[in-house]
């Protein structure tokens, strides 16, 4: 022994030759750059705001808004705060997005199935629907439908009356609705109870079929509950049948319910445009299912409707849901184009707030936060549904 200690090459190698250590160092450097850039932007922005005597923060949300909003799901006036005005904008965005999603899925599914129809005329009309609406920019479609409302329909004094109580004007579409009555609130609760009961019934029927092989008429029973539960409540309260009918008063109608041209044009444009893409996703999903599945189902004596509902669509959902999720997200985000036709969605209300308060950064942050929340919520729901409908390999 010569008294010296030997070192292995790995122990004496410098750290820059170790991939793991280099990776850590690169991450530290990248994090430092991001933090430095963030600090620079924050400090620079704060200095500019102080130089222009612009207050920062969200205290402006408690101040009086001093502007009216044409449509609102909750009571609102110009004396309310900016915070409540923004809440009205959020609810308006949720309203058009929620209704739009439901109509888009229904129309897109019908058009996608029709695209594969053996009827030549139905298939060609569906193809034209898809090609035309996909190739026209959404903003142009919104402006077109908005112009249709104002150019086609007359003023309220010359309103078109296609049926009793229904009026078409350039101020919107007016139609009767049930007059306010305490029974309606309880009917709504009864409907929600029926929905919950239908959900429980569906789970029970599935377990029963797995155990015994016997099918249960879930759809018919569920539809019966959805109609019968509210009907029982309606009968219990004495069958209230009063209607609130639109009546011309001055230069506009009062009573009933009104679908404004802005809301109608926005909803129509979003639904038609997005449903064209959903239809293509449905078509692709159906065609992804092997034709042997259809032949096997028909050999068992199943009717075409049952083959589609029980065999093809459950398997096609694996292909349909991912692009469908993207289209639902697009519909929600595209609703921000409402500002072009005057519908008071969240972006429109936020822009008015920014113009009056000068809180541009806070306003933009709120817009980003709201749409991020809506997008993540939609994505989480669709991912949950995708897992629930995923086929289990055996």
Image (cartoon, rainbow, N blue to C red):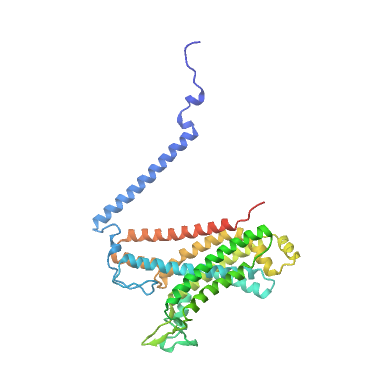
Q: Nearer the viewer, residue 134 or 178?
A: 178
Query: What is the x, y in percent for residue 291?
Result: 71, 61
Look at 27% across and 52% down and name the residue there. Answer: 47
Answer whether residue 132 is visible to the viewer in this image: no
Name the quadrant containing residue 336.
bottom left
Q: Spot the residue most to the bottom.
A: 158
For this orientation, the residue located farthest to the top is: 1
Residue 316, image x, y percentages: 63, 61
| Residue at (55% x, 59% y) in the render | 385
Q: Is residue 295 visible?
A: yes
In the rendered structure, the answer to whether residue 280 lies left or right of residue 183 reads: right
Image height check: is 96 above or below 320? below
Left or right of residue 35, residue 98 in this image: right
The residue closer to the viewer here, 17 or 362, is 362
Q: Residue furthest right?
A: 299
Residue drawn at point x = 58 percent, y = 64 percent: 201
Please give the name of the residue rendered at 47% of the width and 79% of the height, measured from the top-left corner: 148
Residue 265 x/y as whole percent: 47, 75
Q: Is residue 223 left or right of residue 28?
A: right
Q: Position of residue 40 (x, y in %)?
A: 32, 48
């Amino acid at each position: 022994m010569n008294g010296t200690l030997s070192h292995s090459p790995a122990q004496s190698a410098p750290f820059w030759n170790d991939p793991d250590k280099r990776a850590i160092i690169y991450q530290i450097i990248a994090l430092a750059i991001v933090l430095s850039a963030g600090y620079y932007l924050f400090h620079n922005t704060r200095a500019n705001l102080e130089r222009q005597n612009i207050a920062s923060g969200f205290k402006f949300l408690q101040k009086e808004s001093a502007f009216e909003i044409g449509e609102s799901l909750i009571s609102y006036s110009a004396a309310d705060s900016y915070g409540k005005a923004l809440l009205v904008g959020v609810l308006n965005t949720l309203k058009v997005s929620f209704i739009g999603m439901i109509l888009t899925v229904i129309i897109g599914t019908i058009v996608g199935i029709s695209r594969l129809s053996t009827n030549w005329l139905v298939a060609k009309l569906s193809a034209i629907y898809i090609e035309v609406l996909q190739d026209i920019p959404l903003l142009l479609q919104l402006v077109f439908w908005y112009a249709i409302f104002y150019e086609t329909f007359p003023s309220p004094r010359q309103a078109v009356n296609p049926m009793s109580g229904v009026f078409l004007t350039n101020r919107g579409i007016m139609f009767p609705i049930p007059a306010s009555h305490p029974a309606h609130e309880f009917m709504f609760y009864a409907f929600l109870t029926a929905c919950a009961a239908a959900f429980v019934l569906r789970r029970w029927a599935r377990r029963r079929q797995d155990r015994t092989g016997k099918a249960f008429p879930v759809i018919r029973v569920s539809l019966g509950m959805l109609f019968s539960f509210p009907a029982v409540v309606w009968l219990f309260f004495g069958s209230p049948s009063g209607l609130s009918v639109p009546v011309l008063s001055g230069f506009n109608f009062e009573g009933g319910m009104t679908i404004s041209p802005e809301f109608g044009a926005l909803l129509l444009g979003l639904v038609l445009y997005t449903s064209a893409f959903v239809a293509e996703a449905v078509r692709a999903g159906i065609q992804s299912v092997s034709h042997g599945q259809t032949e096997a189902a028909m050999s068992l004596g199943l009717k075409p409707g049952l083959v589609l509902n029980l065999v093809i669509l459950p398997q096609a959902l694996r292909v349909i849901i991912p692009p469908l999720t993207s289209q639902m997200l697009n519909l929600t985000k595209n609703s921000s184009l409402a500002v072009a036709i005057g519908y008071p969605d969240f972006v429109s209300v936020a822009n008015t707030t920014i113009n009056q308060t000068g809180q541009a950064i806070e306003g933009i942050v709120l817009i980003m936060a709201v749409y991020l929340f809506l997008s993540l919520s939609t994505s989480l729901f669709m991912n949950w549904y995708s897992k629930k409908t995923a086929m289990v390999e055996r």
